[in-house]
Amino acid sequence: MALPGSRGIGRRLVIAVPFLWLLLLFLVPFVIVLKISLSQDVIAQPPYTPLLDLSQGWAGLKAFVSQLNFDNYGYVLDFNNEFINAYGSSLIIAGISTLLLLLVGYPIAYAMARAPKSIQPTLVMMVILPFWTSFLIRVYAWIGILSQDGLLNQALTALGLIDTPLEILNTDLAVYIGIVYSYLPFMVLPLYSALEKLDGTLLEAAEDLGCPPIKAFWLVTFPLSLPGVAAGALLCFIPAVGEFVIPDLLGGSDTLMIGKSLWTEFTVNRSWTASSAVAVLLLIVLVVPIVIYQNIQARQLEAGK
Amino acid sequence: MNRGPTWFNVTSLVLGFAFLYIPILLLIIYSFNGSRLVTIWGGFSTEWYVALVNDDQLLDAVWVTLRVAALSSAVATVLGTMAALALTRYGRFTGRSLFSGMTYAPLVMPEVITGLSLLLLFVAIGFERGYWTIVLAHTTFTMCFVAVVVQSRLVTFDRSLEEAALDLGCSPAKTFFIITLPLILPAVVSGFMLAFTLSMDDLVIASFTTGPGATTLPMRIYSQVRMGVTPEINAICTVMIGFIAIIVLIASIATKHQETVRRREEQAAAR
C-alpha cells in the first residue's frame, strides 16, 4: 500500500535517486565491462579499442560494432591458459566449503535456537561480533596459526601428536579453513532464523506418536529449516566462488581460483580486455545462483518475516 | 522449539564459539610479543604499538580509511533508506523488479567483479581516480546492505501511527521525519554501522578503484602481509579490533536504550 497522498514529487524522488545511483554505478559499469571484453588491447590510455564515439551518430555505432571481436573469450576459454581450470576449481572449492559450512554451522544454529530464550540475543550477538572485525584481519590470523612453525604445529608437537610439522598453510586445506571461518556467520544466521521460528508442537506431536528424536529431526526439523539452508548456502557459495583474499593469502601457488586469476590478469598482465572477459564469464556462471538468491531474499523481506 | 541444554547443544556452542574467537584472541596476544618472530613468544612488550604511532604512512592510511568510511556510509545510509522505502512502501512502479534486483545483487556479487566494473566506468568517463572514486564505489555497494537492514524493519512496522498522522493532515514528508524515522532509527543506525565497517574492511574494491595518493588501511595491511607476518601488523589489527569493539558496544547500548524507550511509549500509547 502506498502512503496516501504520496503520489507526488516526494515519492518520485525517493524512488528515482537510489534507482539512478544504482543504474549509473552498478548496471552501467557492467555494460562497460561487457563492451571492453569485446575490444582489443592496445598500448594507450585507456588500453583498449574500439572506443564508442557517439558524436558520429549511426556511422560511429556501426564502425564500433564491426570492430567487436571475441578473441578475449577465445583466450579465456583456451585450455592452455588455465582459466577453465580456475572456473572449475573455484566452483569445487566453493561447493565443498559450503558443505563444510553447513556441517559446522547447522549444529551451532540448532543449539542457538534451542537455548533459553533469554540468552538467544546474546548468542546472536556473539556470532555477529567476529564479522565486525576486519575480514582481512581474520584471514591474517590464520597465517600465524597454520604456518610451518605456527601455533597449531607448536601445539601438536608439544602434545606429542606429530613429529614433523604439518604443511597446512599454502595448501587447499588452508583455503577451506579460511572460507569456513570467514563465512560462518553468514551460514549460521539464516539457519538460526529458520530454526528459531520452528513450531515446537510439531516435535512434541512426533514424540507423542513414538517417533525417535533423530528420526523426528530428519522428518520434521530439517525439512522445515530448508529455506534457511538454501539462503545460507547461497549467501556463502556465490561470494566464495569469486573469492580473492583467502586463496591469495592462505592458498598455495597451485591453488587455482578465478578471483585470483582475474586479479593477476588485471594487475600483472595488465590486460583489461581479457580480465573483462573473465569477469563476464564469471557472472554468467553465477547468474543462476544469484537470481535464486534474489528471489529468496525478496520473498523473505516482502513477506515480512 | 523444545528448550533445555543437552550435551550435544552445549558442545556445539562451545566448539563453535571457540573456533570463532580463538584465532582473534591469539592475534591479540601475539601483538604484545617481544620477539620479532611472530609465532615464538619472547616476553611481554608494547614496542609494536610504539612503532605504530611513529609510522606516518600507516597513520595516513588510517586517516584516508576513516574519511572514506564516514562519508560513504553517511551517503549510503540516506540512499539505502530511500531504496528500502521505495521497495516496501510504494507498491508497483515501472522498473521495480530491476530496482530490487540491483538492490540485492551487490550483497553477493564477487568483489573482483564490482571493483573491476567500477574502475572501467571511472576510466571510461575520465574521472580522476583517488579518494572520491573509492567513496563512490563504497557508497554503491554498502547502500544495498543498508537497504536490506532498513527494509526488514519497515516490513514489521505498525502503520497505524503513520496513517493517523496523515489523516490528521500531516504532510507525507513531515510524517516520515516525525513518525517513521524515529521508529526505524535503530535499523537505520545499524545500517550505517554496517556500511561503515564494510567500508573500513574493504580491500578488493578499494584496490581497483583507487588512484595514486589514496591508500586505505586494508591496502596497506595487505601489502605488508604479502611481505611476511610481523608483530606490527598484529598490533594494527588489535587496535582496529578494539576500535570496532568500542563502537559495537556503544551502539548495542544505544539500541537497547532506544528499544526500551520505544516499548514504553508503545505501551503508553496502547493504554
Image (cartoon, rainbow, N blue to C red):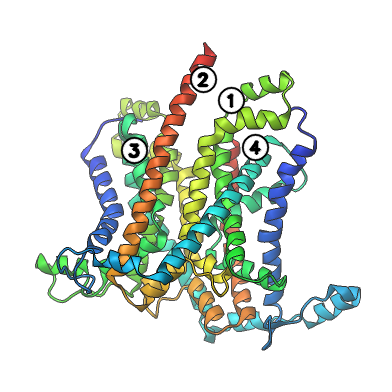
Alpha-carbon span between mark 1 and mark 4: 13 Å
Q: Which residue is mark 3?
A: A122
Q: Residue at x 71, y 67 (%)?
A: A31
| Tag 3–tag 1 contact (CB < 8 Å) | no
Marking on residue B158: 1
Mark sitting earlier along the chain (2/4): 4
User: Which subunit holds the residue at mark 4?
Assistant: B
| Tag 2–tag 1 contact (CB < 8 Å) | yes
Q: Residue at x 46, y 30 (%)?
A: B258
Horizontal arrangement in the rendering, residue A64 relative to residue B14 (left or right): right
Alpha-carbon span between mark 2 and mark 1: 10 Å
Horizontal arrangement in the rendering, residue A75 relative to residue B194 (left or right): right
Q: Is residue A210 above or below residue B88?
A: above
Quadrant in which the N terminus of chain A is drawn = top right
Q: Which residue is mark 4?
A: B88
Marking on residue B266: 2
Mark sitting earlier along the chain (1/4): 4
Mark sitting earlier along the chain (2/1): 1
Horizontal arrangement in the rendering, residue A3 relative to residue B269 (left or right): right
> Could you tell me residue B135's position as x and y percent?
59, 60
Residue A224 visible in the shown view: yes
What amino acid is labelled 2 in the image?
Glu
Q: Which of the 4 image quarters holds residue B117? A: bottom right
Mark 2 vs mark 4: tell me if same chain: yes
Q: Is residue B197 above or below residue A175?
A: above
Q: Specify few, some or many for label 3: CA neighbours under 10 Å numbering under 14, 14-19, or 20 or more.
A: few
Alpha-carbon span between mark 2 and mark 4: 22 Å
Tag in front: 2 or 4? 2
